[in-house]
């Protein structure tokens, strides 16, 4: 069985005389951490066909998110009602819709 490093937990109580964590508490902390991490897992992004994306947009089942640069959008256009990101590489999360249950379909093109 692997041994876990609890040095951060021990450091958190450092300087508090008489405060130490026994092995049971350490196991409970580890279990809590594992449960939190497991609960944070989200489904991985999937690729969908253009026709599937268009059908979802037409049925109002997903939100298009345009990851093109603003300069490219000016020449190529964009999908109506799409969320327009300010930067395809890094953007503030506030640019995404507040509804976290609604699927987002990110799209981007490249100049050929």
Image (cartoon, helix red, strand yellow):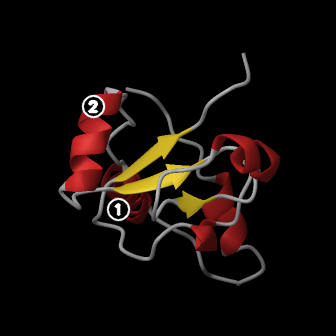
Q: Nearer the viewer, residue 18 or 13?
A: 13
Mark number displayed over residue 28: 1
- Left or right: 9 as drawn, with respect to 62: right
Q: In which quarter of the image is residue 112?
A: top right
Percent coordinates x, y for residue 13 in the rendering: 66, 75
At 62% from the left and 82% from the top, the residue drawn is 18
Q: In which quarter of the image is residue 31?
A: bottom left
Residue at mark 2 to residue at mark 1: CA–CA distance: 49 Å
Q: Check the image and name the residue furthest to the left.
A: 59
Percent coordinates x, y for residue 34 in the rendering: 37, 51
Percent coordinates x, y for residue 22 in the rendering: 45, 64
Percent coordinates x, y for residue 17 in the rendering: 70, 84
- Left or right: 70 as drawn, with respect to 78: right
Work out whether mark 2 precedes mark 1 in sequence or the reverse, and give the earlier one. 1
Q: Can residue 89 be seen in this view?
A: no
> Which class describes the residues within 10 Å of circle 1: few (<14), some (14-19), or many (20+)?
few
Q: Are marks 2 and 1 in contact (CB under 8 Å)?
A: no
> Which class describes the residues within 10 Å of circle 2: few (<14), some (14-19), or many (20+)?
few
- Left or right: 15 as drawn, with respect to 24: right
Q: Which type of secondary structure does the marked residue at label 1 adopt?
A: helix
Query: Which quadrant of the rendered structure holds the N terminus?
Result: top left
Mark number displayed over residue 51: 2
Q: Check the image and name the residue furthest to the right.
A: 71
At 23% from the left and 61% from the top, the residue drawn is 60
At 59% from the left and 52% from the top, the residue drawn is 6
Q: Quadrant of residue 15?
A: bottom right
Vertical side of 30 occupied by 29: above or below: below
């Amino acid at each position: 069985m692997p041994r876990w490093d609890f040095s951060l937990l021990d450091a958190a109580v450092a300087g508090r005389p008489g405060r130490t964590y026994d092995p049971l508490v350490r196991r409970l902390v580890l279990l809590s951490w594992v449960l939190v991490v497991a609960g944070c897992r989200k489904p991985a992004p999937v690729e969908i066909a253009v026709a599937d994306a268009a059908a979802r947009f037409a049925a109002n089942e997903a939100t298009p998110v345009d990851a093109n640069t603003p300069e490219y959008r000016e020449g190529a256009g964009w999908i109506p009602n799409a969320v327009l990101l300010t930067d395809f590489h890094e953007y503030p999360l506030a640019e995404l819709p507040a509804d976290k249950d609604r699927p987002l379909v990110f799209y981007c093109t490249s100049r050929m």
